Amino acid sequence: MDPVRFDTLVKSLSTPGTRRAVVRLLAALPLAGALAMFAPGGAAARCRGARRCGRRNCCAKAEVCGDREAKRCAPRCDDACFTRTGCGCAATFDTDRSYCNVNPTDFGALCAEPACDSHEDCAPDGFCSNVTCGEQTTRCLAACPAE
């Protein structure tokens, strides 16, 4: 590289900017951060091929968003679910979204449990689901563990 051109380049990079330029740069940083979320590889981009579950949380392709409020994902009800021992499918009470759940071994005991009104009534790995206990009612069912 030509030494004169190199010196000119270095001087241009080291020349300090004005205070106004620095203030403009600092004011633009929050906007740049927000726009970066939508750039390839940003927070919004990481959900490609996955389902969104609440704000900025994503479920894997093999999962569904069982509870948007708590941003909890559950295994999808599909062929893989049926091949798991002790697992079946149930629909959540609020969205009728099917997920892979642990099949209760004793429906009598399950139906004796109090009905749930929201997912918050259930354990962290459970979802308030539609079950048939005489009439269609809701009870907490645990999601099948991921394979």
Image: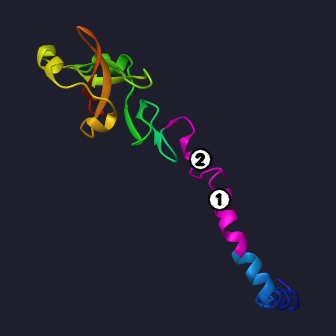
Type of amino acid at the residue the image marks with label 1? Ala
- Secondary structure, mark 1, is helix
Report whether residue 73 is seen. yes
Residue 147 shows up from this direction: no
Mark 1 highlights which residue? 34
Residue 20 in which image quadrant: bottom right
Residue 131 in the image: state x and y as whole percent: 28, 16
Front in this rendered view, residue 97 or 119: 119
Q: Residue 70 lies in magenta, yes or no? A: no
Q: Amino acid at mark 2?
A: Ala
Q: Is residue 134 above or below residue 25?
A: above
Q: Toward which corner of the image does residue 142 lie, by quadrant?
A: top left
In depth, the one of 1 and 54 nearer the eye is 54
Q: What residue sits 16% from the left and 24% below the top?
A: 113
Residue found 82% across the figure and 83% down from its top: 1
Across and down, in percent, residue 42 comes to 60, 53
Pinpoint residue 60: horizontal percent, then vertical percent.
Answer: 44, 36
| Quadrant assignment for the C terminus | top left
At which x and y percent is residue 124?
A: 27, 40
- Is 59 placed above or below 140 here? below
Residue 44 numbered tag: 2
- Of all residues shown, which one is farthest toward the top? 134
Q: Residues within 10 Å of mark 1 (few under 14, many from 20)?
A: few
Number of residues whose C-alpha sits closer than 10 Å to that of mark 2, classed few (under 14), some (14–19) or many (20 or more) = some
Q: Which residues are magenta?
A: 27-52
